[in-house]
Image (cartoon, rainbow, N blue to C red):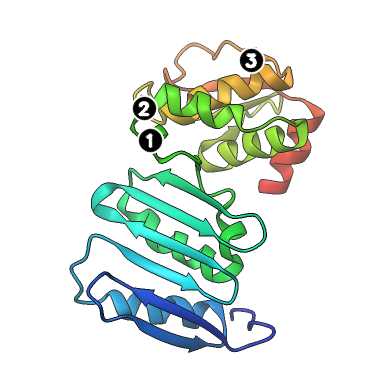
């Protein structure tokens, strides 16, 4: 059972660009998710927006453009954008927003502040994203996110394997980001064993990586 909002109920506004906005009052994130899913039923729209007006935050889903954007107006205004290559990413993003707002999506993918960066080659996007992490704590947390999305621990317990079983054409942006973060953190990358998929990245165990990956396990 979803944890109720406190204080609650909580209000959201759903919009799909057709002028038929819907304001809902919900007790918990699951109820909000179900209300949003019902709102989308039968609508043909390029853009769907969830607004949390009291918090000054919003989430914009753009499936036809392969894009998700999030906005925060209160305190320090900020907007970030995420390129999406799988259609099953949009509703999970909405659920994370219902659960924890703007911050709930921090580890959902490669958020970039400049919308134009999304049009760059995957390797350039990865480099731009890596440059956003200027402290060890933030960088190791991002490495943990990447590992949690596609990684395993080698049976020997000596190596972390990123992009398990992937070839080089998969996750190019995240691979480029990871390689820069490995260098920034001074982690040791090793050659994969014979027979490993071409896109795998193997990294020797490190106390910082052990702690972070344990948190994600």
Q: Quadrant of the N terminus?
A: bottom right
Q: Which mark is residue 46?
A: none
Mark toward the viewer: 3 or 2: 2
Task: Give the Cα distance between marks 1 and 3.
Answer: 31 Å
- Disc 1 designates what residue? 116
Residue 150 in percent (x, y) is at: 51, 38
The answer to which of marks 1 and 3 sits earlier in the sequence is 1
Q: Which mark is residue 120?
A: 2
Mark toward the viewer: 1 or 3: 1
Could you say whether the residue bearing mark 1 is in a helix, strand or loop?
helix
Taking 140 as reference, is 190 left or right?
left
Query: Is residue 20 visible from the viewing direction of this image?
Result: yes
Whether residues under marks 2 and 1 lie with C-beta atoms below 8 angstroms apart, the answer is: yes
Q: Nearer the viewer, residue 118 or 212?
A: 118
Query: Is residue 166 visible from the viewing direction of this image?
Result: no
Q: Nearer the viewer, residue 94 or 23?
A: 23
**Residue drawn where x is 52% and y is 42% of the image:** 149
Residue 162 in percent (x, y) is at: 55, 29
Mark toward the viewer: 2 or 1: 1
- Disc 3 designates what residue? 189
């Amino acid at each position: 059972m979803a944890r109720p909002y406190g204080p609650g109920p909580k209000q959201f506004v759903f919009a799909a660009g057709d002028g038929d906005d819907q304001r809902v009052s919900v007790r918990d994130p699951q109820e909000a998710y179900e209300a949003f899913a019902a709102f989308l039923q039968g609508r043909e729209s390029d853009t769907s927006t969830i607004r949390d007006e009291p918090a000054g935050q919003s989430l914009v889903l753009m499936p036809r453009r392969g894009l998700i954007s999030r906005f925060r107006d209160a305190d320090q205004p900020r907007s970030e954008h995420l390129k999406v290559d799988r259609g099953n990413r949009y509703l999970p993003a909405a659920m994370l927003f219902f659960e924890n707002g703007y911050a709930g999506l921090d580890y959902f993918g490669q958020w970039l502040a400049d919308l134009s960066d999304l049009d760059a080659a995957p390797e350039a996007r990865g480099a731009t994203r890596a440059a956003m992490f200027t402290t060890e704590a933030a960088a190791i947390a991002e490495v943990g996110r990447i590992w949690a999305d596609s990684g395993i621990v080698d049976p020997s317990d000596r190596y972390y394997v990123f992009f398990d079983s992937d070839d080089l054409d998969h996750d190019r942006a995240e691979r480029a980001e990871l390689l820069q973060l490995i260098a920034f953190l001074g982690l040791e990358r090793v050659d994969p064993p014979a027979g490993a998929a071409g896109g795998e990245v193997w990294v020797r165990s490190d106390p910082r990586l052990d702690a972070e990956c344990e948190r994600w396990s």
